């Protein structure tokens, strides 16, 4: 009886334990057996209830084991992936942001193991009992994900602090490839077939050119901006950054094109003070200043947006002080062996460009804006120089030599370029020579006129069409210091003082597939502007009339294809405004075609 009771008690204890375990795992499955035990039905069906409970427990254990295996495989895959990403993150090319993204992804992943939600890879590893931890160790043997990310975040913070000390730096630039052809070229020498007239046809010119520019700009705090730019191009040519592919594959110059520092005081919003070598700070067209010219010196700009002034929306004032040529003091002796004060003053006179501009923008409607600007450009000291002195550091002076006939050898005319170093100008020497300038010169080789230019620009922007916005631009310039030309035979009245620029733009090149069309009419009288500084792609800087056509297509926002045609002519003949060109002389338009592919970055 005792043995039977003990056996019955043992069976009852095992059955109760199994029933409680099954109830904890799946209450719905064992509900009937559990209720029977609670009401004393064990004696009636002890063997059947026990078997059912055991089957339920085994089934739940099998399902749980399968779930654990599935989660273990998932954790292994996740661990391998994270290890691979951390290996890549440890390489120098990896960025802090990329590693932080991996860490964030690992922390945000959620798993369910044995009914417990794991909110990151580490929690899931702990819940799995260490199998995933071993896989994690294979991916990163030295340290955990958190410590690696923390180290990279510290490094990023130090780099950010270093950059904040240097300023926010941005790199940009462009590369332009150009094929250019010119035909219809003439010279102004006596005609080979008829020496009584002038002009000889020249062969067409074909050349490939490249322009490369690399710019660095940055900001230090809220008050200081700085910038530097390197560009190709021959250094004496201040109006072009093109480099012709020539000289037997020689290396091409790459020189400092801009270097400036700007100060914007917080106490005077809208004010900017700038010094160095910079882009032209005032509104202009290439009637007066070539787009590739980078003046140097100082400028001051004050710009203010007006919200309660009716149609007037912005007012901008600009002033500039730009040294052009610094020379050593001159000491010139006259014919009697005494000091020639006037000649000495000319020899030591520095040159500079001073000026100011006022600009206002009016919003005529939601799709029309009018900008008016008036400027004064004073080229101070140009009356004391020869034209050679306003061309860069190495001057190219054309020299024509006639070799007389000798026996059976006919007479020959040879034209060559003679290089003159700038040092001869800086040390006070007076060359007294004239180069191929199209401005009027006196018999002593100096410029006939001074150059104080009044420049008025009107621009109308129409933006009703998003695909083809339009702009109308008109620029009129007048030289107020035109003087008569002194020749060996007397004075010639000089009225060559006006310049005109009329331009129509339609379209844009901002997005892929954009188109832009441009037409410009240009007329520049002989002394309207100072010849070395304005538009360099027309036939000659002054005493010229030209038509320019441009078509551009944006193959990509950063890749622009452009075709330009320029038709130029001498309106006053081959000999210019102050000499009568004999009848029958050749006088025709010159055509210049440019095919450009430009990459911007």
Image (cartoon, rainbow, N blue to C red):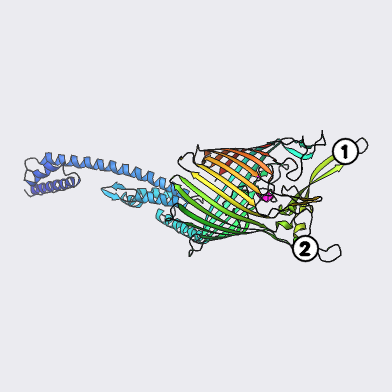
Which mark is drawn over residue 383? none
Q: Is residue 447 left or right of residue 193?
A: left
Q: Which label's residue is closer to the chain start, 1 or 2?
A: 2
x and y, in percent, of residue 91 in the image: 50, 50
Which is in the foreground here, disc 1 or disc 2?
A: 2
Residue at far top of view? 193
Q: Quadrant of residue 275?
A: bottom right
Q: Sort mark 1 into few (<14), some (14-19) or many (20+) by Cα contacts within 10 Å.
A: few
Q: Residue at x 6, y 45 (%)?
A: 40
Question: Could you tell me what secondary structure mostly forms the magenta stretch?
Answer: loop
Is disc 2 placed on a helix, strand or loop?
helix
Which mark is drawn over residue 411? 1
Is disc 1 placed on a helix, strand or loop?
loop
Q: Which residues are magenta?
A: 524-535
Q: Is residue 587 left or right of residue 162?
A: right
Q: Is residue 430 left or right of residue 71?
A: right
């Amino acid at each position: 009886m005792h043995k039977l009771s003990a056996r019955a008690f043992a069976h009852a204890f095992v059955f109760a334990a199994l029933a409680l375990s099954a109830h904890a795992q799946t209450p719905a499955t064992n509900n009937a057996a559990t209720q029977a035990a609670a009401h004393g039905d064990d004696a009636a069906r002890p063997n059947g209830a026990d078997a059912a409970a055991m089957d339920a427990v085994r089934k739940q254990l099998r399902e749980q084991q399968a779930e654990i295996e599935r989660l273990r495989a998932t954790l292994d895959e996740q661990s391998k992936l994270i290890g691979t990403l951390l290996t890549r993150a440890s390489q120098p090319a990896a960025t802090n942001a990329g590693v932080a993204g991996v860490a964030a992804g690992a922390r945000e992943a959620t798993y369910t193991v044995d009914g417990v939600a794991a909110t990151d890879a580490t929690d899931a590893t702990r819940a799995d009992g260490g199998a995933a931890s071993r896989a994690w160790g294979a991916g990163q043997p030295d340290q955990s994900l958190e410590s690696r990310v923390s180290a990279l975040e510290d490094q990023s913070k130090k780099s950010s602090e270093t950059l904040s000390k240097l300023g926010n730096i941005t790199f940009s630039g462009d590369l332009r490839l150009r094929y250019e052809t010119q035909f219809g070229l003439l010279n102004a020498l006596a005609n080979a077939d008829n020496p009584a007239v002038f002009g000889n046809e020249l062969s067409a010119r074909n050349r490939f050119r490249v322009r490369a520019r690399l710019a660095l700009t940055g900001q230090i705090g809220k008050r200081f901006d700085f910038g530097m730019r390197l560009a190709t191009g021959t250094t004496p040519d201040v109006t072009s950054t093109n480099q012709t592919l020539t000289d037997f594959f020689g290396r091409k110059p790459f020189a400092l094109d801009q270097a400036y520092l700007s100060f914007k005081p917080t106490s005077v919003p809208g004010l900017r003070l700038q010094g160095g070598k910079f882009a032209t700070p005032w509104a202009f067209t290439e009637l007066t200043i070539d787009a590739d010219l980078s003046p140097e010196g100082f400028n001051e700009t004050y710009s203010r947006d007006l919200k309660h002034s009716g149609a007037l929306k912005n007012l901008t004032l600009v002033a500039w002080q730009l040294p052009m040529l610094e020379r050593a003091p001159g000491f010139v002796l006259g014919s009697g062996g005494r000091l020639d004060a006037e000649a000495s003053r000319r020899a030591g006179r520095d040159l500079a460009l001073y000026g100011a501009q006022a600009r206002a923008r009016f919003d005529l409607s939601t799709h029309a804006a009018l900008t008016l600007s008036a400027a004064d450009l004073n080229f101070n000291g140009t009356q004391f120089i020869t034209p050679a002195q306003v061309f860069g550091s190495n001057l190219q002076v054309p020299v024509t030599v006639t070799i007389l006939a000798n026996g059976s050898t006919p007479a020959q005319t040879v034209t060559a370029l003679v290089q003159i170093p700038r040092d001869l100008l800086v040390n006070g020497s007076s060359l007294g020579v004239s180069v191929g300038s199209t401005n009027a010169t006196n018999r002593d080789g100096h410029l006939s006129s001074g150059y104080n230019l009044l420049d008025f620009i009107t621009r109308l922007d129409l933006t009703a069409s998003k695909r083809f916005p339009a702009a109308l631009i008109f620029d009129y310039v007048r030289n107020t210091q035109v003087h008569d030309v002194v020749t060996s035979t007397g004075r010639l009245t000089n009225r060559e003082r006006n310049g005109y620029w009329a331009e129509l733009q339609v379209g844009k090149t901002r997005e892929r597939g954009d188109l832009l069309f441009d037409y410009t009419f240009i007329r520049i009288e002989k002394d309207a502007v100072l010849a070395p500084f304005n538009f360099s792609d027309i036939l000659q800087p002054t005493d010229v009339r030209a038509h320019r056509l441009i078509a551009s297509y944006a193959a990509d926002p950063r890749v622009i294809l452009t075709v330009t045609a320029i038709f130029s002519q001498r309106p006053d003949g081959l000999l210019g405004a102050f000499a009568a060109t004999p009848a029958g002389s050749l006088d025709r338009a010159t055509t210049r075609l440019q095919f450009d592919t430009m990459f911007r970055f």
